[in-house]
Amino acid sequence: MADARQVARAAFVRVLGEAADRVRVDIVPAPEGFVLSAIDGVPHITASSPAAALMGLRSMLAATGEPFDEILSAVSGIGPIAPETPITARPRLEHRFYGNDTEDSYVGAYRTFEDWERLIDGVVARGFNEIFIPVGIEGAYVELLTAFGYSRDEALDWIPLPSHQPWWLLQNMSSYPGGMSEELLAQRIELGRRIIARVRELGVRPVVPGFGGVVPRDFGDRNRAVVDVPDNDWQGFDRPAWLDPRSLLFADAASVFYRAVDRLLGPIDMFKIDPLHEGGASTIDIAEAGRGIETAMQRAHPGATWVLLAWQDNPRRDLLGALDPRRVLVVDGVSDRHLALNREEDFAGVDYAFGAIWNFGGDTALGAQLATWNERVEEWLTKPSSRLRGIAALPEGGLNNPLAMDFFASLAWRGSRVDVDDWVRQWTISRYGRAVAPAISAWQRIAATAYSLPDDNDFSEPHDSLFAAWPSFSASTSSLFSPRTATYDLAGFAEALPQMREAAVHLEYHRAFRFDLADVARQTVTNTARQLLPVIARVHAAGDSSEYERLTRQWIYGMRLLDAIAGTEPLWLLGRFLDEARAAGSNPEERDRLERSQRLILSTWGPLVPATTGALSNYAGRDWQGLLGTLYMPRWREFFARNHPDRENAAAIADADWWHRDQHWVESTDRAGIRSEPSGDIVALAGQASMFIERVQGDLSPRVAG
């Protein structure tokens, strides 16, 4: 293994290219963090680890006006400049955790090592030192099942494709969608091993799924084992069985599992396990089960840390109270979601990380609770007997909301709460390399609206896109698990777009600015749907055909415009997402199957019952090029046509009808209207967006006044 300095230099080359030779770096035994200075005009980073060195590099580029990345991805060709005064950074919180169980599914089920490499560099450069990596854990489960009477084919059939694996690991479902091949399994194991090796060499701790006892439903019959078969489903899916953690057979199975993890993925000392996730019911005593899980983990990896996600009713207090508090970390997924929380009491006195999920299902919406984060971390950290020991960034689908990610990461490295308005000003200057007044004003406007979400409405995310919803005149959300009303002042947010367009005079060719301009234009156009739909509904009810036709044309034009805006950015291209899946397949049949899995997770999600009764449909709805043009727009066209006021006996379209209709899209491999390469001039498109919004507002103003 390369020494730490060589690892740091290799990371610098990934970010800077040949310009990396113009930065000195030393890795020294020291308290965690870095010192950035200049020696004879040459930037010099002295760090405690390669990870800290990467953070120092990002701080250097920010301080000198160079962008490190677009979202979480490194870029090359940047010229480093020595800072005028030394910069020192030390963390105040030990645990800086990144990763949601679902992120690999929603944004990268089939991404390559190079994709992971860029993600890791970006996450580490923001100061995170624990990263959740589920990739390759399938291999340990195959070895476990084959050791207990299953054939490899049976084991592979039980494991879902990567697009849906998180919910299998969370004890919610299994086998859907099926089709894991030996080739894909080998690919995933090798990828997981490489990711974990990279994370470890940077000095960061990989966190992988541990063994909590999830097994097939017939495991007990085959092995004369005590298993609990939950009689409650998860969103319409049958849950897998739970091998009783108190049993001797559990200890044997866990031993096989952890030996496989060591051999296939390398040494690990942090394991994430969440028994009875999202309402799982069991007759097994949870405290005794927890001791069984902990004992098996510690036997295999003495001193390992058990990570649990706080979500809904988990982890249960009696479970935490039965564990060794020195070996437990709770990553709190609802720190900013509810008022009047007492986490020291709720978590039985174990260490926890302040966590936030500002993005569900990879939603493209801009927004988060910056004000709540800013206040609550300080409040919880300074109260008597606080057990707050870290932060946990838990977006269900990352690669968006860069302002939120940067602000949240900073919570672990600064000394106190900040003035958010001033922080946003400094962030804008660092992001664009200079102070451009309209850009600063725009982001301060956005921070005052989309990034100042209320903390008392049982949500931690902004409203989603109605364009992605199954059409209805009363649609209020695309996902039934998201806010049903606007979560901030839409008109106030819209004021940021002309300011961003004004800033384009100075920043038109700046890569990060072009992304941000597209993001603000996209969100502003998306927001018009919430203003326009109620008016269309009233016009329809009044039977006004001409106005109905005019306003529905406006709606469809907005969707076409949104498709074009999304098409300017690689991250918002459906074609890229589908290409990743097809590239992972080893033959035409498998390539089609993997593409289908990607289409599924973005649309119906699953079979009819989970999609409708379980309400999983459109959970991952997002404003992407290709999704808008080939899935969402045809839906709304059909809906508007069927409900035209001049049409007699308009046929209602039930959720089941939409599901069947969407399944044709899921099963298709037609790429007409779906792009894999970005195109279009975002500056010109932002101008079109402004004109569209003005036109919509002009239509709505007299109606609102009336």
Image (cartoon, grey):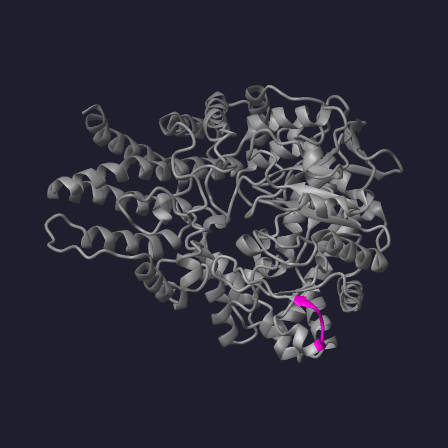
Left or right: residue 86 versus residue 68 is right
Q: Would you say residue 224 sits in the magenta stretch?
A: yes
Residue at 61%, 59% (x, y): give it: 171
Residue at 41%, 37% (x, y): give it: 523
Residue 502 % position (x, y): 41, 26
Residue at 19%, 53% (x, y): give it: 641
Residue 393 % position (x, y): 63, 40
In this rendering, is residue 598 above or below 512?
below
Residue 248 visible in the displayed image = yes
Return the residue nearer the eye: 539 or 386.
Answer: 386
Residue 64 % position (x, y): 66, 28
Residue 12 visible in the displayed image = no
Return the residue nearer the eye: 609 or 526.
Answer: 609
In this rendering, is residue 468 above or below 346?
below
Examine the residues drawn in magenta and state their main secondary structure.
loop
Q: Would you say residue 469 sits in the magenta stretch?
A: no
Quadrant in the picture for residue 649: bottom left
Residue at 49%, 30% (x, y): give it: 453
Image quarter (top left, top right, bottom left or bottom right) of the N terminus? bottom right
The residue stretch that appears in magenta: 223-227
Image quarter (top left, top right, bottom left or bottom right) of the C terminus? top left
Residue 109 % position (x, y): 57, 59
